Amino acid sequence: MSEALVPVDRLSLPALRLRIAELLHPDADPSVAAEVYMGVLAAERMVKEVRSLFDEQLLAWLAEHGNELTVADTKLYAGVTKSEKVRDLKTAAESALDALGGDWYAFASLLSANALKAGECEVVLGPEWRREHFEVSYKTKVEVKTVNQKFLKGKAKAVANG
């Protein structure tokens, strides 16, 4: 392991935790919190770039060494990503419902998670319909959320701008 990219003993998560706690104390200036946040974003970008570089080199290495590498319980291999979308939603839904003899419960079991868009349903069918047919649930864990305001539209933009 002497040729490791970064020695593990130089990656000190405990030291980073302590430093962040020192910087983000209750009386810290907002500019300090912003600076720490920007540093975390920069670190995330670097990790993504390192992963991208690694994947690129690993693909070349796998092509030369048998297309598979096992590291502990993880198998790394060259493969393609598969995605599948319905060609024509209206036609497919009508066909499925017809094939099920009009059984809406059986049809509902074919739908993926959140098949209906809550926001779009509110626009088209009204807020009362949305409240009747959608439920909001909250996780008990409080997390930092981010919103890129340049992508907000309509009601969300008005709420974000006060």
Image (cartoon, rainbow, N blue to C red):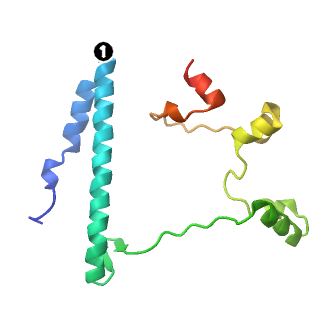
Q: Residue furthest bottom?
A: 66
Residue drawn 16% across the image and 54% down it: 8
The picture places residue 14, in percent across and down from the top left corner, at 22, 41
Q: Name above or below for residue 70 compared with residue 4.
A: below
Query: Residue 141: in sight, yes or no?
Result: yes
Drawn side of residue 62 relative to residue 106, left or right: left
Q: Is residue 15 above or below residue 60?
A: above
Q: Quadrant of the C terminus?
A: top right
The mark tally for this picture is 1
Quadrant hosting residue 77:
bottom left
**Tag 1 residue:** 27
Residue 15, given in percent of the width and then of the height, sits at 19, 38
Q: Residue at x 57, y 33 (%)?
A: 152
Horizontal and vertical percent position of residue 29: 30, 16
- One can see residue 109 in this view: no
Amino acid type at image mark 1: Asp
Q: Is residue 144 above or below residue 9?
A: above
- The answer to which image quadrant residue 71 occupies is bottom left
Q: Is residue 117 left or right of residue 55?
A: right
Which residue is found at the position 29% from the left and 78% from the top?
62
Q: Residue at x 86, y 60 (%)?
A: 104
Query: Element at badge 1?
Result: loop
Q: Quadrant of the N terminus?
A: bottom left
Where residue 148 appears, x then y in whole percent?
48, 34
Residue found at the far front of this picture: 150
* Number of other residues with Cα within 10 Å of mark 1, as a class: few under 14, some 14 to 19, many 20 or more: few
